[in-house]
Amino acid sequence: MNDLTLFFACICIIQPGLSGVNLNETNIWGPGLKPDKIVMPARYFFIQLACTERDQCISNSAQENLEVKIDGLTEQGTPCRSWINILNRKDGFYIVRYKIYVMCIDVKISVYYKGEHVGSSPYISKDIVFNDECRCPRDSLENIIKTWECGSTPLLIRKKLNHFPKIDWTQLRPEVIKTFDKPLSVSLCHYIIKDNRVHRKCYGKYVGFNMFMDAIFLSLTRKTKLPDLEIFVNLGDWPLAVHNMPEKYPIMSWCSSNDSYDIVMPTYDLTESTLENMGRVTLDVFSVQGNTKYLFEKRIPKLFWRGRDSNKHRLNLIKLSRENPDLINASLTNFFFYRDKQEEYGPKADYVSFFEFFDIHNARSLTVRETAFLNG
Ligand SMILES: *[C@@H]1O[C@H](CO)[C@@H](O)[C@H](O)[C@H]1NC(C)=O
Ligand SMILES: *[C@@H]1O[C@H](CO)[C@@H](O)[C@H](O)[C@H]1NC(C)=O
Ligand SMILES: *[C@@H]1O[C@H](CO)[C@@H](O)[C@H](O)[C@H]1NC(C)=O
């Protein structure tokens, strides 16, 4: 240790105030602070540390100083078991997520920085805290939408719904089935919710993806009593109810377009990663945010895409990317459907993992970063 480091070490010991984190201004918010009101498989909330200098908020030592504790009692009066995971987004924000495995009472969430409560910690739940597996439809749907602060229906979905002010299923149901029951080209499931139970019948050959739709309906019926309803869900990769058909068909889809009536909903990757957060799926939106290597500013504003050749739009994207390399970086990782076009749209690019996907930076910014690192 030279004199200079000793000097800095002394300042830190004598003046703890210089640690740089202003506890009073630390912000904590999110649905996971109200576990008795909002039931999720993995609950989550956010912490924004207030620092005099940003680096202090994103360093490993800041993370080590942050501690979250969850106390509660089971029905038998024993302590509730929980699993907590803190993700450092490296921009001053932290994501805390946790799982509670059984029904708990007197749940108290404490957030400490260097052993002191921050934000409005502790957060105390007055009502019973249910685990997600509990079949406990306690709240009305209206209440859930309000407490979850879902906001209004997105414009895109409203626009699609506006085509169907009234649906007469007695007339439409057999028509939809007749039109789309094409085992080799369409995968469609018909859902009926009656008395809060989910019934389904699928049409088509490859309908394994119905498990994602099943999971969402089952999760909702565990939390609330859904109204009786009937819908058709398209499990395929392209819209079905295209404009040039003789009739408008109300079909829920994971994709739509300007020339189809399909009503879009969040894709199964999103619903799956929400339901399996901290569980089977580790590559969810939160894990990715907690595993980035580069600061947001170091990334380049460019569309990045990797995938295989499953439809011709993807080939068009490769063409677009070649014409606009400053805007789009797109490559195919495999050829299967258009093997004959490999020469034109190849060569095959390396597979990019989900973690790396959101961390793409260009060589120039890496150099800048490395220079800054060496200098600082
Ligand atoms: C934080 O709040 C406490 C009490 O509310 C106050 O005494 C202290 O001066 C505040 N510190 C800062 C840095 O604002
Ligand atoms: C689709 O329609 C919207 C407006 O309704 C328009 O802004 C958008 O450019 C259209 N997209 C395509 C690909 O035509
Ligand atoms: C596209 O991204 C890959 C992976 O980061 C990179 O190796 C390649 O150089 C990029 N291409 C262009 C044209 O920027």
Image (spheres, helix red, strand yellow):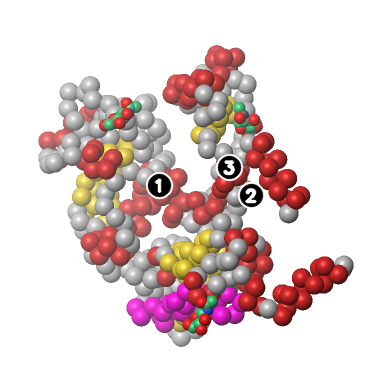
Question: Quick one: label 2, few (<14), some, or many (20+) residues within 10 Å?
Answer: some
- Which sits in the foreground, 127 or 337? 127
Q: CA distance from mark 3 to mark 1?
A: 33 Å
Disc 3 designates what residue?
299
Residue 348 horizontal/vertical position (percent) = 62, 25
Question: Quick one: label 1, few (<14), some, or many (20+) residues within 10 Å?
Answer: some
Q: Is residue 253 left or right of residue 11?
A: left
- Amino acid at pointer 2: Lys
Answer above or below: position of 179 versus 188.
Answer: above
Instruction: Give SS at disc 2.
Output: loop
Q: Which span is picked out in magenta?
A: 104-127
- The reply to whether residue 343 is visible in this rendering is yes
Residue 311 horizontal/vertical position (percent) = 45, 24
Which badge, 3 or 1, comes first in the chain's sequence?
A: 1
Q: CA distance from mark 2 to mark 3?
A: 10 Å
- Amino acid at pointer 3: Arg
Q: Is residue 360 left or right of residue 104?
A: right
Disc 1 designates what residue?
212
Which badge, 2 or 3, comes first in the chain's sequence?
A: 2
Q: CA distance from mark 2 to mark 1?
A: 31 Å
Residue 280 horizontal/vertical position (percent) = 53, 54
Numbered disc in front, either 2 or 1: 2
- Which sits in the foreground, 33 or 183? 33
Which quadrant: the N terminus? bottom right
Q: Of the numbered discs in the image, which one, if any, rests on residue 293? A: 2
The residue at the far right in this view is 2
Q: Is residue 108 magenta?
A: yes
